[in-house]
Image: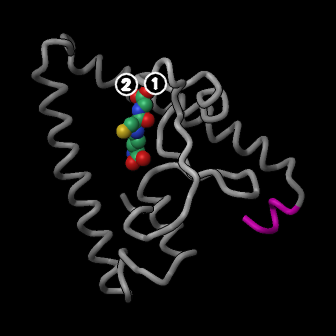
Amino acid sequence: MFVAEKGIDIEIVEASDPGNPAELSDAFCERHPHRRVPILELDDGDWIGEAAAICRYLETIYPDNLFMGRNAKEAARVEMWDRLAEWEGLMAVSEVFRNTHRLFVDPVLSAWLQARTAVERLVSSVAARERGAVGQSGYRDTH
Ligand SMILES: N[C@@H](CCC(=O)N[C@@H](CS)C(=O)NCC(=O)O)C(=O)O
């Protein structure tokens, strides 16, 4: 939606195989062990994850049509609403779901396992990324 509203021409690549649209493809998971979409792949081979971070990046490099604030106050208010929606809205919904749905028979254990899996995937993904990036010339100077 953000890309469309900005009017940016970016190639959109499906992260799943056509025959199995419900699952991320093996090729995608190998490349991005964190196993989350969206991912923005850059021309220099680097990538950015997290929708808000991708929007912020695109907003910075395509400043003609601003959506995330035209000045410091507007930018701070956009950030404020983003964090409010995520932390006090989405997190609350998530907690209710996690602690009431029959699939989560042991809510505390389930939450802990989910958090551990998420952190393990994140660490593995960032480590793989850093290993690749360190091999690129000039990485330390430019990032
Ligand atoms: N905080 C992340 C959330 C990303 C996320 O959870 N993406 C989901 C789809 S909406 C995903 O990739 N799920 C893959 C899976 O569960 O296999 C963001 O804002 O980008």
Quadrant of the drawing holding the C terminus = bottom right
In screen coordinates, is 9 left or right of 92? right
Using the image as rendered, state which of residue 108 and residue 103 is in the foreground: 103
Name the residue located 32 percent from the left edge and 69 percent from the top edge.
79
Q: Which residue is mark 1?
A: 117
Name the residue located 70 percent from the left edge and 36 percent from the top edge.
128
Q: Quadrant of ligand 1?
A: top left
Name the residue located 48 percent from the left edge and 45 percent from the top edge.
38
Label annotation for residue 61: none
One can see residue 37 in this view: yes
Looking at the rendering, the stretch of residues picked out in magenta corresponds to 138-143
One can see residue 116 in this view: no
Residue 75: x %, y % from top left: 35, 79
Label annotation for residue 114: 2
> Which kind of residue does numbered mark 2 sit on?
Gln
Using the image as rendered, state which of residue 101 and residue 12 is in the foreground: 12
Residue 13: x %, y % from top left: 56, 42
Q: Residue furthest right?
A: 137
Name the residue located 81 percent from the left edge and 61 percent from the top edge.
140
Q: Is residue 123 above or below residue 1?
A: above
Q: Image quarter for residue 73?
A: bottom left
Q: Are marks 1 and 2 in contact (CB under 8 Å)?
A: yes
Q: Residue furthest bottom?
A: 71
In screen coordinates, is 73 left or right of 95? right
Q: Is residue 140 magenta?
A: yes
